[in-house]
Image (spheres, grey):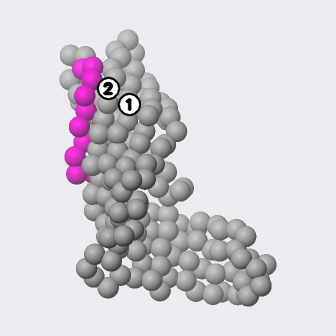
Amino acid sequence: MLESQGGDDFAAFNAFIKYATLRIPPQRIVKDGVDVDLTAIQCANMRLTDIAVHSEEKSQERVALSVDIIGVKMECKLHWAVKYGIIHSSGIATAQLGKSNMYLAADVFSQNFTLSPPERIVVSKCQMQLRVETLDFSGDRPPCLQLLLCRLVVASSLLSLLSLLQCLL
């Protein structure tokens, strides 16, 4: 088991990932007559508080692995466009994610771990708990929407997208 013992055990790792940028492909979400396009999606300034890794050898061919990533923080920015009938609105959204957690369970396979490296990983469970600390929008604001529709649709789309993508990476 790998686990921190308190303090800032991840200072060097956080200094490294701070400059990494997660670029997410454009997404289109259509729901209840509302079309949402999310483009130029980037998350950066990532850092984490703790990681706990547990493994259990099930056989010479399979190892069960679980990973808890605790206290994930990052900043995300994207271009958004919403279309609802004849109403169009677009702009930029920025989000600060903080104190988010991720749990991943997987089986790692090899022909024989004593003789060869892993060949395949099968993820059996992935859970994300995202906490949005701030969510800011700029851009067009048609009077009939007055942020309500745009913010709700884009915010829920962003959270769904980030949950899915973090578990797939």
Q: Is residue 31 visible?
A: no
Residue 112 position, x and y percent, is 77, 83
Mark count: 2
Q: Is residue 48 left or right of residue 136?
A: right
Question: First in sequence: mark 2 or mark 1?
Answer: 1
Neighbours of disc 2 within 10 Å: few (<14), some (14-19), many (20+): some
Vertical placement of residue 4 versus 104, above or below: below
Quarter holding residue 139: top left
Which mark, residue 79?
1
Residue 130 position, x and y percent, is 34, 56
Disc 1 element: strand
Residue under the image location 53 percent in, 71 percent down: 105
Q: Is residue 95 visible?
A: yes
**Nearest the eye: 122 or 97:** 97
Q: Amino acid at mark 1?
A: His
Q: Is residue 129 left or right of residue 140?
A: right
Magenta-drawn segment: 132-141
Residue denoted by label 2: 91
Disc 2 element: strand
Vertical placement of residue 37 versus 133, above or below: above
